[in-house]
Amino acid sequence: MDKASAPANENDNVFEDLSVIIQYFQAPLLWNDAQRKKFVNDRSSVIIDPVLYKLVHPEKHPGFTDDRNCLVFWARPPSDLRSLVANIQQQLLTVAPSLWLMPTECLHMTALEVDFSRTAEEIDEIVERMSDKIPGITDYPFSHRARLIKPMLSYDTAAIALSFVPAAGESLPHGRQQPADTYTYHHLRRDLYELSKSTGLEIASRYVVPSAHLTIARFVTQADIAVSENDETLDPPKVQKLLDQIEKINADLRDRYWPKDDERIMAGGDWIVGQEKGLDCRKGTLWYGGGQTIRLGKGF
């Protein structure tokens, strides 16, 4: 989803309050009610990404390529979380078989977007300018371990994502003490932003609101929720069927993958950023999970 993921108000002291940080990260989950209204009451059409549409329909757009080059630092989900996403994607396909799914090997959360929509040559120049800082940034989560919990599907008229909120001491994994959760994903992104800025670069991110999410599916057609092949008007019963499936998945996530008293969270239900892999510094045409790795950080 193209809702936000970059540090907002990095120097604002309000973001030192853990309860306030969690409130901001919960916003995507609360947006579901507003998006449901758009689909059901306003009958808003889905937003189809024209570039992605051309890429998945080469027979209609032969020779088309995406020339928007970016430079990012991605957090890669661990294997148990990728398995959870794969299961959720299959459940979504039962009611919306035309969804475009993010390949699980391409899943990512944008910890920091340095620049976007540049030429390959311009991105290479930026990489050269910050090359001394890249190892430290990609390894940073090894010593600064932010934990995310409460996976929940959030959606808008363009995409579906799995969103998370920062942990606040709930169901701590073995070996982790409660004070560790005071360093949140928001603090991690703030630090990455400052490390990148220290190179003298202007950080040209598209994202401005605190969020932690993995985009797992995008709409490339509204055929699954339209009246018919010849009438693309949204069909309320079909829309409701999709939204009901999303809520069913969310109910299962709350029941099985959210913290419960002092019980251990089921595998896939929490994520310490840096598990298995450090940050992935990546460049190229990577809007849909592609691109090339410049350096992969040290995981734990």
Image (cartoon, rainbow, N blue to C red):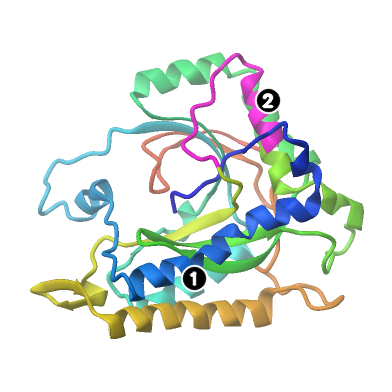
Q: CA distance from mark 1 to mark 2?
A: 37 Å
Q: Is residue 233 above or below residue 166?
A: below
Could you say where residue 270 lies in the image, as x and y percent from the top left? 70, 64
Q: Secondary structure at mark 1?
A: helix
Question: Position of 7 compared to 3: left or right?
Answer: right
Q: Earlier in the sequence, mark 1 or mark 2?
A: 1
Residue under label 1: 33
User: How many numbered discs, if any?
Assistant: 2
Foreground of the two, 94 or 295: 94
Q: Which span is picked out in magenta?
A: 190-208
Write the residue at 27% across / 56% down: 48
Does the rendering let one see residue 82? Answer: no
For disc 2, the marked residue is 195
**Label 2 Cα crowd, 10 Å radius (few <14 / some 14-19 / many 20+):** some
Query: Percent x, y for residue 92?
Result: 41, 75
Which of the pair 291/215 is nearer the observer? 215
